[in-house]
Structure formats: structure tokens, C-alpha cells
Amino acid sequence: MSRKKRNTLSPEDQDLWARVAKTTRPMKTDFAHIFDHPTEEPVLDAPSLPVAPKPPSRSLKPVGSGVFPGHSLARPLSEALADAPVAMDKRRFQRMTRGKLQPEARIDLHGMTLAQAHAALNGFILRAQGQGLRLVLVITGKGRRVEDDGPIPRRMGALKHDVPQWLRMAPLAGAVLELREAHARHGGAGAYYVYLRRMR
């Protein structure tokens, strides 16, 4: 097998190639220089926006007449209610707290979930005020004592603790003049007297 002879350039082609080679420049094969100095685009400063003034901090106050006493779970709720200033007629207040005034209507929240009880209480209080009633009884129960061996303590008697808060919040705050724990003959620690304002 014979090898093919390599084509050699003619003298004219060699001369032409030499002239073309003189006009060219060697190509750079190292592209690192491209990344060494990247073109930095100018960073435009964002226009400064006016800063809104910080609103003054305000503490929320309960709506209604009497100031609801701040209640710590370490302190019995009955004591906190007893220390609240009296908003109604004092003689009538004494008769109420001694159990001598008969409630004109009552609602028993036993067996309800907190959501059901809250809705039922709202409807009951607003209807009672609309009918011109003054003294109503809200029965919450004292709450069951439960064994508490978990990492998060469970509060006994959620309704007993939440009902006074609900009565001092909208939409009931404007309807309630006085809130006290009931006398023993009307349920004692398991019920509340709610004395209503007259509708204007």
C-alpha cells in the first residue's frame, strides 16, 4: 500500500500565504483576563422616600363605665371583681350583691364551647337590654378541676374567666353597667350578676 503524497504549495501560493499571514494577529486563548476586571455598572442610588412618622403608642382601654380590674391568674377572679369601683346606684348594688334582687332573666352556658358561649352571650345580653331588663344572671359554672401533669398548665374554668372579658368588649361593653359574682343563692362563684344600662 503506497502512501499518498502530501500536496505541496506552489511558489505562488506560498507567496500569497506569506502576505496573508503578515496581516493577521495571533488569537488569545487565555480568557481569564475577561473575568479579572468585570465591567462594573454604576449603581444608582434609590430615591430616598420620606419616612412615615412612628405613631404614638396607645394603650387600649375598655369601653363602658366602670374600669375592669386587671386580673392576674394568681389572684382569684372574685377578689378582682370585688375591688372594681361601683358604677351603679349604691343601695341597689348592695341589694344585688346580698342576693335580694331577683334576676329578670338568666342564661346557662354549661356544656357550650367557647365559640358557642360567646355567640349565645352576645345575643342574650343585647336582647335583654332591648327588652328593658336591668339585672340578668349569666351561669358559667365554677369549672372542673383537672389533673394537670403536662408541660403547659391548663386553666380551670375557661368560661368563668372569659365571660367577664367578653362583657367588657364590643358589642357588649356599652350595654353593661355592672358585673359582679353572684350571691350563693343565685350560683355564687359559678355565676355572674350583669346589671344593664337603660337603652337611650
Image (cartoon, rainbow, N blue to C red):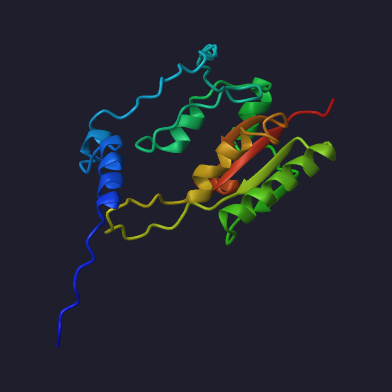
Residue under the point 67% across and 31% down? 173
Judge from the rendering whether residue 188 lies leftward or rightward of residue 26; answer left or right: right
On the image, which quarter does residue 44 sit in?
top left
- Taking the image as drawn, is residue 54 in sight? yes
Where the N terminus falls, by quadrant? Answer: bottom left
- Where 67 falls versus 190 (above or below)? above
Judge from the rendering whether residue 37 lies leftward or rightward of residue 79; answer left or right: left
- Where 39 falls versus 77 (above or below)? above
Residue under the point 57% across and 53% down? 114
Residue under the point 19% across and 77% down? 4
Residue under the point 63% across and 37% down? 167
Q: Position of residue 182 (x, y in %)?
A: 57, 41
Where the C terminus falls, by quadrant? Answer: top right
Q: Position of residue 140 (x, y in %)?
A: 56, 51
Q: Residue furthest bottom?
A: 1
Number of numbered discs on residues: 0
Q: Position of residue 57 (x, y in %)?
A: 50, 16
Residue toward you, 42 or 138 = 42
- Where 47 falls versus 160 (above or below)? above
On the image, which quarter does residue 112 sit in?
bottom right
- Taking the image as drawn, is residue 182 in sight? no
Judge from the rendering whether residue 133 lies leftward or rightward of residue 108; answer left or right: right
Residue toward you, 129 or 41 = 41
Q: Position of residue 98 (x, y in %)?
A: 59, 35
